[in-house]
Amino acid sequence: MNSYDDIGAFKSKIDQEELNFQAFGDKNIVMASAWPLLNELMHGAKTPAKPVNSTLASNPKAAFAAANVQSVRDISTPQHLSANGMPSSTEAELKTAADKPTELSAILKKVSR
Amino acid sequence: MNLVYLTSPKGGVGRTTLTANLAFALQRLGHQVVVLDLDVQNSLRLHMGLSVAEHRGVVAQSQHNSDWREHIIETPSGVGLLPYGQATKAQREGFNTLLRQEPDFLEHRLGSLLHQPGCITLVDLPTGPSSGLDAVKRMDGLGVVVLMADGCSAATMPLVGQDHYLGAEAGKRALYIINQIYIRSRLNRDCAEFFENRLGSALLGRVHRDEAIPEATASLQSIFEYAPTSAVIQDLEDIARSISRMLPDAYGHDSMKFSLR
């Protein structure tokens, strides 16, 4: 019975160039994930997925004045679902107090009808 | 005082995620919601859909005697956010000193926000005892302890009532949420039953595990936007309703009654 030559087989394998370790440091790898947060983390702060409402951020007093409750999203607005069943989060949907003054009581009266 | 603070004796239980999701749920009930991040990880901003590049926060400017309502960031969902922010070691230490040494530090900074009708402020605390926890304990807020249905969380329960943590008095008043219950796991089911027996009426609610929750965060959306049909939304809404009812100033507001009757 012929014994299997382990050492010989190993030597012949490591002589094959295709088994050399692959290093990707010299290659241009582009990551494109389905998850916006991962893309943002990978590509740094260049492409924020959802911009902050800069108007309100620069003028928070207006949005959060002590007297009036504002800027609650209009929950009576039906969500527009995309083909995959998920709501389309367009910027138009991101209604804020600056875009559309929405006093809390007014919204809630509208909903309660 | 419409203040709710979330704490956990054990890390990794999903407290920050839960804070964000409860904020969305309370907002859907009609409340104006502001979330305050007192955790150095500064990750609440990501759950609220802000950019990774957003470095503003309350710690860096804590030495200034300013009203924090001026620093509230309006997030895409409409929930107001006071992030921890990026801070140097000196700024963090100075912030912790203020929290420990000035008894009314938080109350002064948050001002009338805490008493604004219909408005609820949620505070996300770091794991375990912290200067932030000591500060919110002194305020007349609603303490919520977040646990997972596992042996380690069960083992950390006795810590909650200890003096260096919530203390006996706040520990008795505290409410509990069991987070990320996985009903196919026998251990999870048994632990959930253990908590129910042990906590009784102090158990505020339970939130089932749903892969859609981390997916929503990675998508920079709320769970209500990302998976509006998810069963976990029912869990969150039940808890939000309970919290709303426990805060007389928020619940008693005329404009709130429509959704809670």
Image (cartoon, coloured by chain):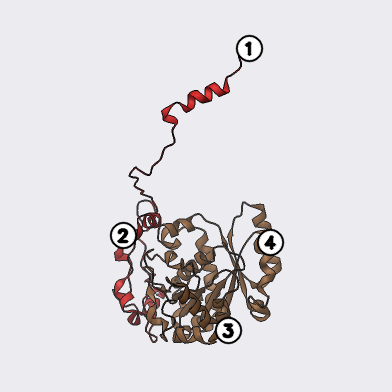
Chain colours: A red, B brown
Mark 1 or 2: the one toward you: 1
Residue B203 in the image: state x and y as whole percent.
Answer: 63, 70
- Name the subunit of mark 3: B
Mark 3 or 1: the one toward you: 1
Query: In this image, A38 relative to A53: left or right?
Result: right
Residue B144 in the image: state x and y as whole percent.
Answer: 58, 73
Q: Which of the numbered marks, if any, corresponds to residue B157? A: none
Residues at marks 3 and 4 on the same chain: yes
Identify residue type, mark 3: Arg
Mark 3 or 2: the one toward you: 2
| Residue bearing mark 1 | A1
Mark 2 or 4: the one toward you: 2
| Residue bearing mark 3 | B138
Query: In this image, A98 relative to B77: left or right?
Result: left
Separation of residues labelled 3 and 1 (CA atoms): 84 Å
Quadrant in the picture for the C terminus of chain A: bottom left
- Residue at (32, 44) in percent of width and height: A28
Separation of residues labelled 1 and 4 (CA atoms): 64 Å
- Badge 1 local density, few (<14 within 10 Å), some, or many (20+)? few
- Name the subunit of mark 2: A
| Residue bearing mark 2 | A46
